[in-house]
């Protein structure tokens, strides 16, 4: 196996040379299981752990390896390898960590494209698509919308759904597929490029595991049926895993996400709602909230029907969520700084007491 088969390119080779790491093994994290990692190298697959120093100095979850990361490691035997360094990532898809104050969850690293998968029969929701788009844009990942389970609805509904997407979402490829008949798969396979890394974002039960099985030509992931009582997909995939497809593309499967809190401190929201953001530059007040101010260009466009009402409402919700996330991150940093100072002062005091004895 060559590293290039798993997405290694000149970007990472240059980083390796700059840090004088030519004598070390390089591998890519292909699976993660509770802080134990499966790493693919030219010598094979190894179960790996991180060094104690990496664990001690980590400021948060982003400082730990994630599926898709390129890592520097030392292989001790066939059963053990130790990860010493994570090579800098060129992209990171992340969301707010569920139930963690100001925390983030890494979905995957070093991703080129993301398939935003939604089932057209019952899961379809453009507001959620805009949420996924925001995650992609803030992560510097190119999105591709995939509509699954088209065999469960008629052609007219498919056409209407595609039309609704194109009215609200511009310049993003949309592919409609059926996992049963495999209609649309030829189009999707042509999009997938050798050596590029793709991940899938979508709720449980939208057909991600079946999509991966069909693209790989193997029964890699177990699939399950939709619950008849709730109408929701059962949570089948419980971890992230990186797989090389037949045509050389690289695909990361990850668990369905019931909650998709945006961790956007970049320009993801502004890119998703570009029309609204552009109009806001013409508002009378620079701090306009676009909710009731006089001279608001966004509200004027909304009244004229130039902005979709649902998209406008989704923008306000996500803007509020982004502001809340940024404030919690700032507060967490402030508390961490205070705590760090307390620990530092304690150590200084302890050293002085020892010297005075």
Image: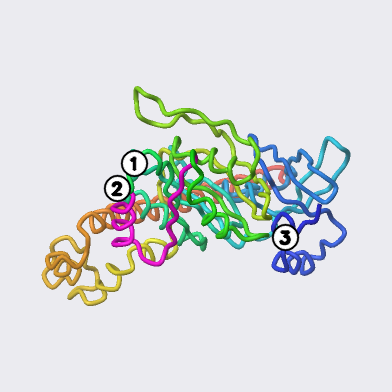
Instruction: Report how far apart the C-alphas of labels 2 and 3 lie in the structure.
Output: 42 Å
Viewer-side residue, 115 vs 73: 115
- Check whether the beta carbons of the residues at disc 3 and disc 1 lie within 8 A of each other: no
Q: Which residue is mark 3?
A: 8
Pointer 2: residues within 10 angstroms few (<14), some, or many (20+)? few
Instruction: Report how far apart the C-alphas of labels 1 and 2 lie in the structure.
Output: 7 Å
Number of numbered markers: 3
Residue drawn at (17%, 75%), measured in percent from left and top? 284
Viewer-side residue, 243 vs 74: 243
Give the label, 3 or 1, closer to the camera: 1
Give the label, 2 or 3, closer to the camera: 2
Q: Which element is circle 2 on?
A: helix
- Check whether the beta carbons of the residues at disc 2 and disc 3 lie within 8 A of each other: no
Q: Which residue is mark 1?
A: 153
Q: Which residues are magenta?
A: 156-179
**Along the horizontal axis of the image, is 313 left or right of 18?**
left
**In which quarter of the view is residue 135 placed?**
bottom left
Residue 212, x across and y down, in percent: 58, 43
Residue 124, x across and y down, in percent: 34, 44
Residue drawn at (40%, 50%), measured in percent from left and top? 328
Q: Which element is circle 1 on?
A: loop
> Residue 157 — which label?
2
Q: Which element is circle 3 on?
A: loop
Q: Vertically, is 113 above or below 304?
A: above
- Check whether the beta carbons of the residues at disc 1 and disc 2 lie within 8 A of each other: yes
Asked if the stretch drawn in magenta spans residue 178, the answer is: yes
């Amino acid at each position: 196996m060559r590293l290039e088969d798993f997405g290694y390119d000149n970007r990472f080779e240059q980083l390796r040379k700059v840090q004088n790491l030519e004598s070390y093994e390089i591998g890519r994290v292909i699976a993660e299981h509770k802080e134990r990692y499966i790493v693919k190298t030219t010598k094979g697959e190894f179960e790996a752990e991180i060094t104690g120093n990496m664990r001690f100095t980590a400021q948060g979850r982003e400082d730990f390896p994630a599926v898709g990361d390129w890592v520097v490691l030392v292989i001790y035997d066939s059963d053990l390898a130790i990860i010493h360094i994570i090579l800098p990532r060129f992209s990171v898809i992340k969301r707010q960590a569920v139930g963690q104050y100001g925390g983030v969850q890494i979905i995957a690293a070093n991703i080129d494209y993301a398939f935003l998968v939604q089932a057209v029969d019952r899961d379809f929701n453009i507001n959620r698509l805009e949420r996924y788009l925001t995650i992609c844009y803030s992560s510097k990942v190119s999105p591709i919308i995939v509509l699954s389970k088209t065999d469960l609805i008629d052609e007219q509904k498919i056409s209407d759904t595609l039309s609704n997407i194109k009215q609200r979402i511009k310049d993003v490829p949309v592919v409609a597929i059926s996992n049963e008949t495999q209609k649309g798969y030829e189009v999707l396979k042509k999009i997938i490029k050798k050596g590029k890394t793709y991940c899938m974002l979508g709720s449980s039960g939208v057909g991600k595991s079946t999509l991966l099985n069909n693209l790989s030509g193997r029964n890699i992931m177990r699939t399950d049926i939709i619950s008849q009582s709730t109408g929701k997909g059962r949570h089948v995939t419980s971890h992230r895993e990186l797989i090389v497809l037949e045509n050389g593309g690289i695909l990361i499967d990850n668990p369905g996400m019931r909650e998709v809190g945006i961790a956007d401190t970049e320009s993801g929201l502004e890119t998703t709602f570009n029309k609204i953001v552009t109009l806001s530059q013409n508002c009378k007040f620079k701090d306009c909230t676009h909710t009731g101010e006089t001279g608001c260009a966004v509200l004027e466009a909304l009244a004229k029907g130039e902005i979709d009402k649902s998209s406008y409402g989704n923008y306000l919700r996500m803007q509020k969520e982004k502001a809340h996330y940024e404030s919690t991150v700032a507060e967490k940093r402030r508390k961490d700084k205070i705590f760090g100072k307390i620990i530092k002062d304690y150590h200084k005091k302890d050293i002085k007491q020892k010297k005075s004895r």
